[in-house]
Every structure is written in C-alpha cells, then in structure tokens.
Amino acid sequence: MAQFTPTNSAATVYAPTSGGNPRGANMGAAQTLTDEMEKELQRLSGAVINAITFTLNAFTIPDAYKPWSVFDVSTLAADSTITLPAAANNIGNVLVLKRTVASGTYKATVLCAGSDTIDGWATGFPLLAQGDMVALFPKSGQWNAIAVRLAPYIEVVSATVSARTLFLGTTAIDFEVVGAGGQGGGIDGSGTASTSGAGGGGGSGAESRGRLDTRSLAAIGLVVGAAASGGSLAAAGNNNGTDGGDSEITWSSGANKVTSGGGKGGKGGAAATTATINLGGNGGTAATTGSTALVSGLVQRNGEQGGPGIMPGVAAQTVTGKGGSTSVGAGAPSTSTTGAGAAAQGYGGGGEGAKAGTASATDYQGGPGMSGCIRLIHHFLR
C-alpha cells in the first residue's frame, strides 16, 4: 500500500512557542492536514468498478487508479488488449481485472507495460472465459498475482501446426498425443468354390500423456498423424494395409519431442481353400527425442495390435481382423461380412481387414485407420 505522507508534519501543525511551551494548532496547517487525510481515506476506501471501453480494440489502465478498483471486461466486439500501467508508478495499489462478458469468439489479452512482468516472467495473460479474474499487486518493475481464477483452455487439435504460438502467461500445457491407426489388410478373391480369406486388422496408434512447463517457451510444434502415412491407402487385393502416421508435440525448434507412433497396417492375403491366418498390424511405438526436462508426469504406451484375419478351413467361418483401439477411439470390429474392411471408429483406431467372398474373384480393400489427435489443456499464471 502506498505510504501516506502529509504536506505538513505534526511539528508544523502544533508548533511550540518560542519558549518551548505548547500552543494551539496552526489553523492553516491543520486544515491542510485535515483535507489531505480526508482525500487519503477516500482513496483507501474508494475502490470502484470500471467498465472498460475499448478504443480501436485497446484500453490502457491509467496511473493513480483507486486501490482495489475492478476493471470489468463487459463487452467485446473483437480481440482486444488491456495494457497495465507501470508497476513502479502504482506501488502497493492492488487492481482487479475480470471478464463478465460471455465466453465466445473474442478474447481479451492483458499486457504489461515496458519491461514490467507478472511474477517475474509473464508479460501478459488472456481473459478467455466468462468469470476469469486476476488480482495484481504492483511492486517496482513487477506485478504479483495474488489471486488467480483463469479457466483452463481445452482444445483438440486434428491438423498439424508447425509453430503454435502460446497464449501469454501460459505456465503449463497438459497434453495427450495419439498416433494414427493402421489400415486393415486387403484380400484377393480367387473365383474358386469353397475359397475365402480375410485380412488382418490395422494396429492402433501409441499414446503419450504428460505436462509441459511452458514458462520459457513462446511456441510449440504439433504434428498430427494421418490415417495413411504415405498419403494414400493400399489398393484392393493382396496388399498389406498402409501404416498410420506418427503424432508429436515438439518444442525448442523441434529439438525435443514426445512421439506417439502410428499403428502398422494389417497383413493382406489371398482367398484359399485351406486354413490361413493373416496377422494384424502391430500397435504404434511411443518414444521421446532430446531433453524431456520440461515434462513431468509422462506416461506412454504402445498401441494395440490389430486382430488376425482367420480362414479356419471352412469358408463360411472366415472372420476378419479387428482394428486395434486407443483409449480415445475404437478400432473397427471383426465381422464375417464379405467385402471391404470397415473404417476405424475413433481417433487412432485401426481399420478392419477385408474378406473375400466364396467363389468370388472380387478383390477387396482393407478398411482405413483413423487419424491421430492431440488434446491440449492450457493453464495460465498458476
């Protein structure tokens, strides 16, 4: 709290006589002291709610605001900025910023002035959700967050972003990285009576979860594995399914990364009269590259292997290989239905193997796996 320093000292207001004896108060000096004390009491008890009015989508909080004043973001017509005053000019005067306008398309970003920081590192923070609130206490050259209620920002990323700029004030990101699922194996039809066959299911993508400390980072890279890592699915017929692509979260210009590998394609085959098994593709492999010093709580698991396509020697009993599943997406189930394999049902799941019809010369394609995904939870200031 800023110190109250009156213009006149007590010695001036109650100056003694020349002989050192006390005398009545100097009325002029006493009146000045009274006026100043009244103003100080008004300042200390006069916090107000200020509805922010943006000009060209920007607003600057003035110096000498009243302590504990609330600056309210009650309307937003576009992404907007709020610039704090210099901390050194307002030492001890707490201010509060709150968003009361509904969450929506537009965000408000609070910025520090000059070289000021918040808690010694952050240069700002976002107000993204209705009810977001931060109370700040200024010291020389620095603001200190003494109360923070900022809702985490949650998103699912389904497309690669080579350099994702982070929100100001992002302290950490909880990540969940899922590799893509593999394609099921295809099958050749023979056209011969009593023949059949089925492809193996595609393996599921690997999974990685952890928390990345982002206080020293401005951006991260996000790679989302495609359902067909080579760009296209394997054709119908005796072809192994295409592998799923790897998903990754990277930082420090890609030097450090957490990888969830894509699932492998299921084995293709040809219809036959004898028992045959076409194995499912292996699950993707989880890995790390470079330093993981900024990561805590890292948990990784390899993907689930796809099921085998089985022709047990009796064409009517042939079953396809199921696709492997992840914790966030199911692979395609095993069936006894003739035709192309079914697609995976959720992120990172593997596709179903194809099945040849009895006495049919038609070739069938393995079902496609599902692309990977990355789920992020952004945390701010705390």
Image (cartoon, helix red, strand yellow):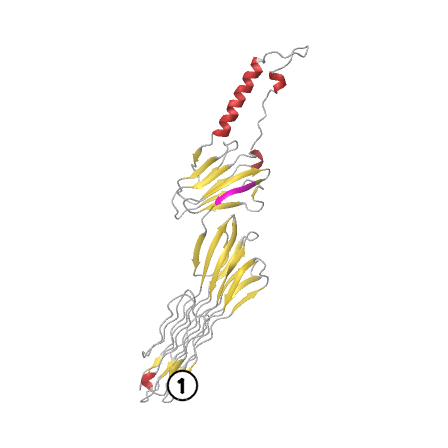
What main secondary structure does the magenta stretch of the protein show? strand
Q: In this view, does 60 lie above or below 273?
A: above
Q: Residue shown at 52%/42% (left/top)?
A: 146
Q: What element carries label 1?
A: strand
Label tally? 1
Left or right of 311? Residue 300 is right
Q: Quadrant of residue 273?
A: bottom left
Depth check: 235 or 60 in front? 60
| Residue 259 image offset from top left, x and y in percent | 52, 65
Where the N terminus falls, by quadrant?
A: top right
Q: Name the residue under label 1.
A: 276
Q: Residue shown at 44%/34% (left/top)?
A: 50
Left or right of 17? Residue 39 is left
| Residue range highlighted in magenta | 143-148
Depth check: 216 or 56 in front? 216
In the displayed image of the protein, which residue is found farthest to the front? 21
| Residue 213 image offset from top left, x and y in percent | 55, 55
